[in-house]
Amino acid sequence: MKPFLRSALQGSLAAVAILASSAAAHAKTPADTLVMAYVIDDMISLDPAEIYEFTASEYMANTYDRLVVIDPANPSQLKLQAAESWSVSDDGRTFTFKIRPGIKFHSGNDLTAEDVEFSMERFVSLDLNPAFIMTQFGLTKENVKDKVRVKDPMTLEVELDAAYAPSFFLNCLSFTSVVVDKDLVAANEANGDWGHEWLKTNGAGSGPFTLRSWQPNESLVLEANENYWDGAPEIKRVLVRNVTESATQQLLLQKGDIDIARNLTGDQLAAVKKDPNIKLQSYPKATLWYMGLNVTNQHLGNPDVRRAMRYLVDYDGLQETMFNGTGIKHQTFLPDGQLGADNSTPYTLDVAKAKELLTKAGYPNGFNVTIDVTNKSEARELSASLQNTMAQAGINLVIKMADNKTTLTKYRASEHDIYLGQWGSDYQDPHSNADGFLNAPLAKRNQWATPEMEARVMAARDEKDATKRAQMYMDLQKLQLDEGPYVILFQQVETIALRKNVDGFIVGPTFDLDLYRDVVKN
Amino acid sequence: MTDWAIAVTPPRWRKWLLAETPQSRLQARLSRAYLSWVAFARNPLAMLGLVIVAILVFCAVFAPWVAPHNPIAGDLGNRLVAPGGEHWLGTDQQGRDIWSRIVYGSRTTLLIIFMVAITAAPVGIVIGATAGYLGGKVEAVLMRLTDAFLAFPKLVLALAFAAALGPGIENAVLAIALTSWPPYARIARAETLTVRGTDYIAAARISGASGMRILIGHIMPMCMPSLIVRVSLDMAGVILIAAGLGFLGLGVAPPQPEWGAMVSEGRSQILEQWWVCTYPGVAIFIVSLGFNLIGDGLRDVLDPREG
Amino acid sequence: MKAALRLILSVATTLLGLLLVTFIIARLLPADPVLAVVGDHASESTIEAARIRLGLDKPILVQFWIYLTNVLQGDLGESVRTGRPIASELARVFPATLELATLGTLIGVVLGVPLGVWAAVRKDTWIDHMVRFFGLIGYSVPIFWLGLMGLLVFYAKLDWLPGPGRLDFGYEEIVTPVTGVMTIDTLIAGDFDLFRNALAHLILPASLLGYFSLAYISRMTRSLMLGQLRQEYILTARVKGVPERRIIWKHAMGNILVPLLTVIALSYGNLLEGSVLTETVFAWRGLGLYITDSIFGQDMPAVLGGTIVVGAIFIVINMLTDVAYRVLDPRAR
């Protein structure tokens, strides 16, 4: 019996030893593959007409071409992509695009004005989440067929309902003018759905990468498009794995099991900075961390309560710790870098002041209120800190944790008291955030929108004089700072951690400008 | 140790307890319990378990005096401090003292096991005793139900319940209780079957007591001792399931300290600040081990064949 | 024959009970199941259409009947998060759990049985106490925490074992799933390096699960063995001068083999359950991770689908061991 036991033990120990040695000897990531750990649970659809959330727009940017894109190196400049040139009519209402010749879709089909026309009509007709970006120019399901016209195989015309500043329209197009493969999508259409069911899980683009596989909440695999018109990417495959625990991301990166970790917290970035095999790369995003306060809540409806809450955040403490490297203290709705952005931060942690405001509002002892939080390390820790400082004035935050999609769904239905999350500009124009925070969708979700406010937002949008326009946005930010239904906390800085041997990864101001094309592994 | 104790003049109460011919039912029972205790106390591991649980109860009751810091109020300037000095188990990502949170967390743990016990045991006893006493079709149906529940996977079902009910201590308790009553029903039924035919129950019946009254007044109390033992044997398992729920965010709502959730929160710091998720796990382990040691000791005493 | 029929009947009712419970949980949901399916932008008419499509307008008993027939036809509904059929998603992830639980049980048996026998033979010596204490620790330690500690020590600090996942991260999508069992698929692909990599990734999580299985198996083996060692025939054999090793491994073992098989089968069922918390820690894409992910996603249909699968396997294992017991053990006939 004893010899048996001994041999069994010895056998298993030997097996462990052999396997362990082989594991250590194994090359960590394949030389031709970029391996990235990323939280991609907000990716719910791959259809460009539906893509609106962060990680999916990154997918879209790398697998599709758009007529025009923002130059990530210089966000105030536009770059032509699928369009070779553009012009605008004298009345400012009709835009003409010349399509770049020689672009082929992954299917082998040629990209022509027909495809662009189809894509725009599809985008507007499906009327999904991002459709408003186009419908705000007077394009509707009914008229889009007449307003978007193919002049010849390589020329397209778009007619708007009024004259807008060309940069405003083109900024919007930089997100929405994704060209899908008309023949391929039409072939997969079912019940007049514009191929939506199919395109939700498949690709029909012409971009530098093709979609190989997508398992929701698990992984996304892209392969290089060897025939890309602007040159094939050097890296042959991009593997994105959903890793929700940032500690696991850190571990994998330091061990060399992945090339890039996308979601490290401030603490972790500080830790990996010391690792000689790792480098950091960052870019301030047009993304804000904020709390949305539903004003139909009996407590949150009171402006003094909202003011008090803005005094109950340890902005500086958070900036130095959790957001060290991942955020900059920011309290207005326009991120730094956009026209008219007000970077002042009048609010600091001031419990006495907050108590005074609460007493004035009739809640000297505070109250209970729920807060919906996405289950990500950063949001989790941020909410814990908010809970802590709010409690000092008696406001008891009851944290409800769920995944991104669930909290968003609840938020969109205005079923929240407080929502803690991020808002990213849809395009690099102040109107995106002004409209978002003061009108739709955020002000509507928080039940604070009014027709008067909408009118002021639209007036700012249509102002042709840049100086006047900037001043109008400054005024709107003052108003939001004082009585808005938000506690705006930080402007996100996207800092990614890479192995030293990875070069050429582009981090842009928005997620649809995070590009893999130039990545090389040395 | 015990031999030595007996060698010294045994006090009168011990003599009474050890009497060969007990004078009353009470004396017989107490005597049996005392003998079990003597056997139990001879097992050093079981006594270790008892000490652990005693410390747990002590910490829970006297938490404000045992814990040096406020378990909820944080201080960002003092976060992730390494163990030693003022914070001898360190601080977490909110700057809260981990030892204090563990001490207060013992309240949560005790509360959960206590609530599970007083929820699941009565359900089991009612179903088991009713089945055993009434017999026939009722028994067949009730015991079929019990067997079915017994065959379900406990943890997964508790997870499903908790996920449907949402996070919160009451829901966690309910989820665990809903999956842990079947063994109690079986025991209660077995006990009922042995006492059902006794003269004592017959006498009650002749004196005109209703079925309900017999069930509640006479049969259920008889089931209690073995049920209490069984419940205490299950406590370690309950602690682990509760910690698992907490780890998955289905336990107590933050910021109340709960050990499973503390492990989960500490995960993002595991590489640099290992203490944040290590110590709460050690607490779960020690307390669960304590209950298991007691359970093992009890099993030895009550079922000597196995020992 | 009659016994077999009764057995089948009892399994059927137990499964029915399981489905009833999951059905009740589905209705317990405080949130509106319709809203979860159609999303936030749905109009009144879409909501109404979905209500009818989901059968929520029908009486509750009819709803249960529909639910029952769907599940029995292998239709577990669609995942709220991904919109894909839950049954096929579960089928995709299940082999990973099977692989883990099988190796875990193997470890539990290979180490647990000898330890149990050893403890029984040396009853009340320090060896016995050590084995029992070692087993009790296995019963007491929270598996998710032990997993984290294991990763911290063996992967992060010592670098003896590979990290989370079923293969090194960059390779996981390369292997074409044939059986879904990574060790087999890598062999089919003919890549011996990846096979060893897959095996290396299995060591830590499987050892953890194996420890739990060991705790249970060694304890039951000890107890069963003690029961045999007290028997007359052992004494007789000893008097006759049969070598001790033969007495234990041949005579006594032969007699406890059948109940031991039951114990092993039950521990296998328990490991399927134990995998829930283990897989979460090891990013092991199996049934357990699927269930916990679905919990975070508040994807109740998926959670319940997973529960049904684990429950059904649990129940069937119980049944099979019962049958095996009857067939193999002459006394039980």
Image (cartoon, coloured by chain):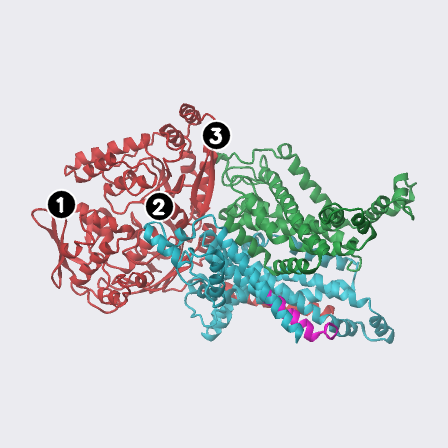
Chain colours: A red, B green, C cyan
As measured in the structure, the alpha-carbon distance from the residue carrying label 3 to the one carrying label 1 is 51 Å
- Amino acid of disc 2: Arg
| Quadrant including the N terminus of chain A | bottom right
* Chain of the residue under the numbered disc 2 shown in the image: A
The percent position of residue C32, horizontal first and vertical second, equals 43, 50
Q: Is-magenta flag for residue C320? A: yes
Q: Which badge, 2 or 3, is on the more N-terminal residue?
A: 3
| Quadrant including the C terminus of chain A | bottom left
For disc 1, the marked residue is: A162
In front here: B240 or B164?
Answer: B164
Q: What residue appears at the point 74 percent right and 45 percent down from the top-left corner?
A: B217
Q: Which badge, 2 or 1, is on the more N-terminal residue?
A: 1
Q: What residue appears at the point 80 percent right and 60 percent down from the top-left corner?
A: B305
Q: Is residue A391 visible?
A: yes
For disc 2, the marked residue is: A412
Counting other residues with Cα less than 10 Å from the Cα at mark 3, is it few (<14), some (14-19), or many (20 or more)? Answer: some
Element at label 1? loop
The percent position of residue B290, horizontal first and vertical second, equals 69, 48
Q: Which of the two discs, 2 and 3, sits closer to the camera?
A: 2
A520 relative to A382 in the view: left or right:
left
Q: Which residues are magenta?
A: C315-333
Counting other residues with Cα less than 10 Å from the Cα at mark 2, is it few (<14), some (14-19), or many (20 or more)? Answer: some
